[in-house]
Image: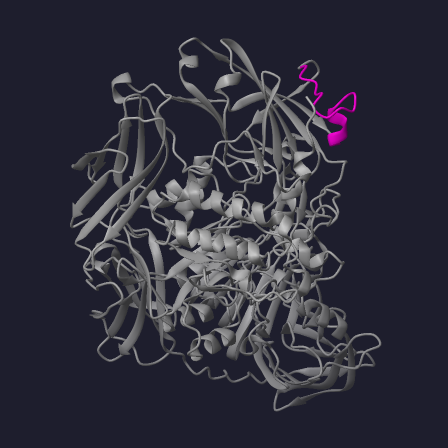
Amino acid sequence: MEFAKMHENPDVLHVGTCPTRSYYLPKAPADEGESSRICSLNGTWSFRYFDSFLDVFPDGSEGDICFDEEDMDEIEVPSCWQNAGYDRHMYTNVRYPIPFDPPYVPDENPCGLYLRRFYMNEDDLKFKTYLNFEGVDSCFYLWINEQFAGYSQVSHSTSEFDISDLLVEGENSVAVLVLKWCDGTYLEDQDKLRMSGIFRDVYLISRPENHIRDYFVKTALNADFTKATVTVETELCGAPEITAELYAPHGELVGSASGAKPVFEIENPLLWNAEDPYQYKLVLRTPEETIEQMVGVSKIEIRAGVLYFNGVKIKLRGVNRHDSDPVTGYTISREQAKRDLFLMKQHNVNAIRTSHYPNAPWFLQLCSEYGFYVIAEADMESHGAATQTGGYGMDEYADVALNPIFDKAILDRIQRSVIRDKNNACVLMWSYGNESGWGPSFEKAGAWVRAYDPSRLTHYENSYYNARGHQNDISSLSVCSRMYAAPEWIDEYFADPKNTLPFVQCEYIHAMGNGPGDAEQYQQQIMKYDGFMGGFVWEWCDHAVYGGTTPDNRDIFRYGGDFGEFPHDGNFCMDGLVYPDRTPHTGLLEYKNVIRPVRAELLDAKTAQIRLTNYRDFTNTDDFLMISWEIQQDGDTMACGVIEDVAIAPHESGVITLNGEIPTQGDVTILLNYSAKKDDSVFFPKGHALGFDQLIVSRAARAEEPLTPGALTVMPDSRTIAVCGPDFRYVFSKTEGVFQSMVKRNEAVITRPMTWNVWRAPTDNDQFIREKWEQAGYNTPMTKVYACDGYVENGVAVITCRLSLAAVYRRPFLTLDCRFEIDAAGRIRAKVDAKRDMERPFLPRFGLRMFLPKAFDTAEYFGYGPYEAYCDKHQASYLGHFAQTADDLFEDYVKPQENGSHFGCASVTVTDGAGAVTVTSPEDVSFNLSHYTQEELTAKKHNYELTESPDVVFCFDYKMSGIGSNSCGPELAKPMQLNAETFTFRFDLAVE
């Protein structure tokens, strides 16, 4: 049979497919027992891989395809063929993997031919038989019993074929030719690893001649939410007799109805929301078939620019999520999806954006069951159009959206998303897609969505781009959506009365690597503005391909560029709140506490009164909250207790009083730990941590201990100044301005010379400022000491020096005036006055680096712990006393980078159990203790390539610049930058 290249014809999207319908799996009538009408074709298929579409046809004639199983390989379905060893993986974010020449794709187009045999008996053939593919990337041709049966594209949508007339009694065959690329590839340029194949379930459905083809469950509520109407609109094949029953969430029958449009009235309905996801069960019966559908009753409204859900203002504490796994790729089981959802619930997440395509069709059923608000996104992204001429052109951004050859496809993709998922209670918004600009195609599709389902909100972020002179009509959109809007922009949005739509950050606080660093800043705005609906972190999970383990048993995760592909975007796919294996990043712990359900404010330290505010939208604290509290002074617990009964209505505040006296001196804090009051057998047990607040009552002024005078000698030469005391000898470098050796009690304190420290191994969020840092020479500084002197004054050795830091061929970026005092006990007191060249970028950090013997691997500190903490990323940590090893302090990012620093420290002691090096300061410092140098972390692409230093690396800093989220978000906020023109660093360094 001859057939044209349908995969390069945008007018041919589907051949032989049934019209799109809602997702459901019919059953046999109850009187037939549990017999299923579903026959899974998952399992082992015969498989032949071709490097080119042209190689599929041995005589060059399209359609003359060889179905001979001889010499075919085997492959599991569902799966991605790259994960089975065929072709190669590829990661690209924006750029297309093919030339931009729509609708054409390369002739050297990799393909996979799949073949599976199945059996039909005489009884089977009495039913109509439908063949369903839930997901095939990117398109496929279908043959049943070697007869061409159809074609379909849209990778992440279900394609259903009526194959009844092609089947025979006995053995039958299904053959599927999957192409890596098609004209739909121009509409599927999502930021993800690119994989191919039959990656979702495949099955046969046996159905009677007369059946319900589709249905739309619609719910309506009266003004005071005391009465609900549930209407079922059905579309039929033939004329089946329909009866319907509706059961309440606890199982009792609400009512029954008959006919093609059953209607149910519910008095005092239990409403669905993400905190209490009550669902009714609808049972639709025909004489030969049963369909069950879970139904959530809710009402979504926008009033005066504010989102209301069931009459209540709600906030979205969301994440963006791909179907992704390092071993199985796009192929995700229910168990894998549940693992994601349970982790989200355990970390206070209540909303998901299905970026940037419909997830597996049963995924939204799980979201409805477990309670998540969902932005359901269509399989639509043409971001690569912006790079078609080699740069990044905003005028070109919408070239696909404005191209009329894609009008039909864009409408089809958006319709398929809405129609498939329309009966899921979790769907809050329909999203037209992502990063494709705007054009008439989206306007037509948006008008269809609003007419088809006016009960939900509509969303599309890219609508504000005006391209090629097109005047955008965005009247179909319900919300204003932006990605990574700076806090200043958000303030301006709400200050302008012309902005009447509620605002949502569909992507924000980019979680790549060590990050995000500005979650709390955004959360303050979300709480401040009623019209700020909330945001969705980019993103949930690091995307990678598992590569086994190294000889020393370290996991290998591969990302862009590790497969020899071009183009690629490196580790930009490693941008999640959890690692590929779902181990939480510290960023997830940060986000969890930022979106904690309760927040506290100290009202009166004398009476120990605290105001609590309940940020749950529908649940009283009495139903979920238990509080354990501690009053701490200088890190020691002075009083503690548990409060089990706190009743505060949603969005309201209440006052609790602690049964303990709050000290008035020292470092005084109140730590409130929030935990689950009741056992939740699904997500977490009673006592599960929900978050915490630490209220800082006072921070002690730190008086410097007097130095101990004694008999000291100072011995200068041309290069050094040696200071000798009763049991120590410290040697100061007159060329570097720091100590090059320190020996106490005949033991070396440092194994290498100290260094001034301004560089940090760039985080992923430093990727743009990094270039400026390197241009300034922060990564390769050289020291020039202009003056240096040493003498004894009042029994204390004094070293003064003036120096600068500069890189080769560049002028100095930092000038330091230093005074070091060394007493008879070997304590070093330092005062460093710094002046910066303000034409250079802000500093990554400023401090000193010491190399200690390997045994000095434990840090005892009073500061923010136990997790890594920075000036803008410490909400997961609290102020206290901690003791942790260098291994404990290390955060093992897949792409090595700055990690494990601790902010806000009054003191830190590094010890081997016998000796100790202690740093204290009148002002808080940050520190890092690691087995790796920042040079090693900077140089290596993967964590499994890291080589430990022979020393323990101890960095203590006057300040470390914040983390931010600039890998895709705004520049690091100025208050979080080490950008002062002058500053003074004071510290004491004691050796025991």
Q: Is residue 322 among the parts visible in the rendering? A: no
Extreme-front residue of the structure = 239
Quadrant (top left/top right/bottom left/bottom right) for the C terminus? bottom right
Q: Main secondary structure of the magenta part?
A: loop
Q: Residue at x 53, y 17 (%)?
A: 166
List x then y, in percent, for residue 147.
Answer: 61, 19
Q: Residue at x 53, y 40 (%)?
A: 156
Identify which residue, 610 or 425, lies in the foreground: 425
Vertical order, 391 against 727 (above or below): above
Vertical order, 393 against 213 (above or below): below
List x then y, in percent, for residue 967.
Answer: 61, 62
Q: Which range of residues does the magenta coloring cover? A: 51-68
Extreme-bottom residue of the structure = 794
List x then y, in percent, for residue 624.
Answer: 25, 55
Q: Is residue 172 among the parts visible in the rendering? A: yes
Identify which residue, 165 or 757, lies in the foreground: 165
Q: Magenta span has 31? A: no
**Residue 497, quarter of the rendered image:** bottom left
- How many badges with numbers are in the image? 0
List x then y, in percent, for residue 954.
Answer: 61, 65
Q: Residue at x 30, y 55 (%)?
A: 675
Quadrant (top left/top right/bottom left/bottom right) for the N terminus? top right
Identify which residue, 567 or 524, lies in the foreground: 567
692 left or right, relative to 827: left
